[in-house]
Image: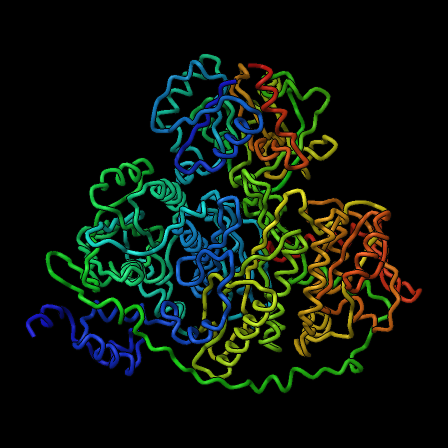
Amino acid sequence: MAKSKKNRPGPEITPEIVREHGLTVEEFRRILDLIDRPPNLTELGIFSVMWSEHCSYKSSRPYLRKLPVEGPNVLQGPGENAGVIDIGDGLAVVFKIESHNHPSFIEPHQGAATGVGGIMRDIFTMGARPIALMNSLRFGDWEEPRTRFLLNGVVDGIASYGNCTGVPTVGGEIYFDSCYNGNILVNAFCLGLVKSDRIFLAGAGGVGNQILYVGSKTGRDGIHGASLLASSEFDETTEDKRPTVQVGDPFTEKLLIEACLELFECDWVVGVQDMGAAGLTSSSFEMAHRAETGVFMDLSKVPLREEGMIPYEILLSESQERMLFVIKPGHEKEAFAILDKWGLDGAIIGEVIEEPCVRIQFDGKEVVNLPVFPVVDGALDLKRETKRPEYLDQVVQIDLTELPDFSHGDAALKKLLACPNIASKEWAFEQYDHMVRLNTLVLPGSDAAVLRVKDTQKAIAISVDCNSRYCYLDPYEGAAIAVAEACRNVVCSGAKPIGLTNCLNFGNPEKPEIMWQFQQAVEGMGDACRFFDIPVVSGNVSLYNETKGDAIYPTPTVAVVGLVEDQKQIMTQGFKKSGDQIALIGFTMEELGGTEYLKTMFDRSDGKPPVLDRKHEKQVQDFCLELIQKGFISSAHDCSEGGLAIAVAESCFSYGGQTLGATLTLESTLRNDTLLFGETLSRIIISFPEERTNEIEDLAMAFPVDFSLIGKVGGSHFTVTVNGKEVIKQEVNILKNIWKTSLGNYAGQVT
Amino acid sequence: MKCGIVVFPGSNCDHDCYHILKHILNQETHWLWHKEEASLESFDLVVLPGGFSYGDYLRAGAIARFSPIMNSITRFAKNGGKVLGICNGFQILLECGLLPGVLIQNQSRKFICKNVFVSVDNPDTAFTQNCGEKNVLEIPIAHHQGSYYIDPHSLGQLEENGQIIFRYCDTNGNVSAESNPNGSVGSVAGVANEQKNVMGMMPHPERCADPLWSRIDGQIIFQSLISNS
């Protein structure tokens, strides 16, 4: 009794307080069962964050277990700060994608900036130097008044943070749809490079080892970011949650990168974890959990930014740019010398103990004494109900005969080139320093970003992808398509896909229809990954992307990483030379469901998404990769949103490249709209010198894979004839200008 | 040529400059740490690289000028030593008065990272002597505070003294408002001091000097310095 009294300073835990902490009555009862006494307020706060959806994955975990996570080159799968894959030459890539959706909607600049900071720390925590940032951004409709503000704020936030840290932001995707009006998505990806024998894990091993706090001082920002902001829907009170958004300091992050990489060189560093969501709480509990040890900490020793902070605040603060190291005793001076060199705060705040507990002292009094396991792993997996949504019955049927076809496609082509989802993202890419550190071989705007691996012949290709409209129409197929497309993008750059990380953005999991979307999408992604033999090595789940009952489209974003063995075999999407042949790998079917064409021309988001034939997809990818590796072709471009006509147009005027015309001569029984703007999958547009034609045709026959010559590069116009009739003829420079300036014009308007 | 590359907290392009000088151009290259004064007599070139020294808090370059190493660099420059400031390095050189003028926010108020063209305004300096017939270089920029400003009278003096080294231009070398990416007065992209031993430029020559890329115009600047040393 005496002990529990000592443990209970502050108010009595009422049902009201429990509810305010986002815990259910059942969960509170479970806490009582697990620790055999009522928690004090600080301890309740710890359970609140650690059992939140954001930290515990309690709704999603049962499904995530079904994803394939193993492969011969996987050095670290899910469960650590990031996944690691061996790329040979004694090197490995470390990567992960993570959401920062809710904060970015409330405060776009800081929300996006700290999203970048957080994902970067996940990477260098593993001992890797971050070498590339990417992102997947989704905003509401262009007509929605807040969209322009959010777009500018997020892009500016990413630029200001990434640029200052000296890690290049090498590309990404930006989509707009009214389903994101009330919940934007900011998914940040980072990739780092590490020696494969110098990977650091986040364990607090070795009783008696010292707990070293490194980085910014702890302030009152971001308290309950994980539990109250990221784990509930938005409503009228959302604006009041602004204080839960953290504030980033990229300069400290840059110093932290350099100092940590220097610390990692020392053999007395045992483990390290960044203080991300749930701050000092999650880092200490998780490190103890992984090493099956305990941790003692004295919060009086934590460097603080403000006076009068209480243990509750110190433990739950999500102040940025902080790390927790475990080092062997006797090396404190060396550690402080490194921190001092980089002008960083550091303090020994505790040590590893044998008893599997986290015991925390403040001002000489014990304020927390909790067993590790219940806090980290005690949240029950929720078996949430699933139910197929009724909207699916209405949206999947589409009668093409109702839609007027066109005889001349110029107007549609121009409208599509200007539409938010197809228009060039150059306006954003130019704000990112995408060249620093001299590794960016392919500038942003091609199918995939490509970075050289210094001191080797290798290169890494990265593509971030998800067509959420497809996922809305069929979450299983949509997620599988995201995997296929990201792989295709990487292949078009000359790389072989080696691993995947995902960011699963969905609505409120308490609704059976949302849970069904989640279940279907994870199954679709898992099946596709198994088929293409791509391990899922890391990921993140973001639920409750819902405002006043309106959920976002299911958005299971994937980032696929590919490996190029020889830097000379890198391919880009732009046409290179007048006179080159243009050919299509794959074939076009009469499909129009879920297309950008339907959305842009008829404001419809219905129909069945295009059919993914996995076997065919694999053949198309293998064939394309072989052409690239044999050095036969001059360009390769994935045919996706906007279809064939848009893909060829983009090859005519790719960002950073020259502008060339093209003439396509097509024979087809399809409608003009589906032929030109349909989004049949498994198609790649390539170009090559005419003298290669026979070799390539022979190879296609031998493979076998569908292959057809469709036109030639050259001239000042983009011209398409179908069955002898001209359906498109436009000056390339005019088209390029429409495509290039649309997004910037929109973003720069003053309203 | 013996080169020193200054590392401030927040320097980002230090490794890139090192890579080009040491590994691509095979020059003897050393790091210079911001906290320490150094004797630089034996050096032929000191490079202040790009980045965000001290987070660019307050004003780009404003804090870095107080670093101990800047005392050594100022002495080195006064004695005729060659100093090249790139991007943030240029900003620092302006802040500590080794070069005239200031750099303010880009006209667009946004960070700009892209390839631009610069015309070589003065080919008779240690930094440009190898340009020869080539009077237009393609070099990337990456900055937020890169709009050069100086009053019209002083600009006239710089022109007279041949202190304007580079101006933004189009592919054919025409200097115009359209080819000026950030609103710099006179489209100035790089200036030197009167003695022409200190030069600052916003474009990043180290980003186009590795032959892995097809464009290596930046090499000409480093090669000029090597020839001169």
Identify the residue at the far right of this view. Answer: A724
- The answer to whether residue A127 is seen in the rendering is yes
- The answer to whether residue A143 is seen in the rendering is no
Residue B78 found in image quarter: top left
Residue A592 found in image quarter: bottom right
Horizontal and vertical percent position of residue A473: 62, 77
* Residue positioned 59% across, 41% down in the render: A457
* Residue positioned 30% across, 52% down in the render: A324
Residue A484 found in image quarter: bottom right
Where's the N terminus of chain A, which quadrant? Answer: bottom left
Q: Is residue A259 left or right of residue A367?
A: right
Along the line of sight, the residue nearer the viewer: A486 or B109: A486
Identify the residue at the far left of this view. Answer: A2
Along the line of sight, the residue nearer the viewer: A452 or A196: A196
In this picture, is B174 found above or below A292? above
Where's the C terminus of chain A, which quadrant? Answer: bottom right
In this picture, is A519 found above or below A297? below
Q: How many numbered callouts?
A: 0
Horizontal and vertical percent position of residue B21: 54, 26
Horizontal and vertical percent position of residue A390: 57, 87
* Residue positioned 58% across, 76% down in the render: A475
Horizontal and vertical percent position of residue A234: 43, 73
User: What's the coloring here?
Assistant: rainbow
Q: Is residue B216 left or right of residue A304?
A: right
Along the line of sight, the residue nearer the viewer: A572 or A115: A572
* Residue positioned 48% across, 61% down in the render: A537
In this picture, is A591 found above or below B34? below
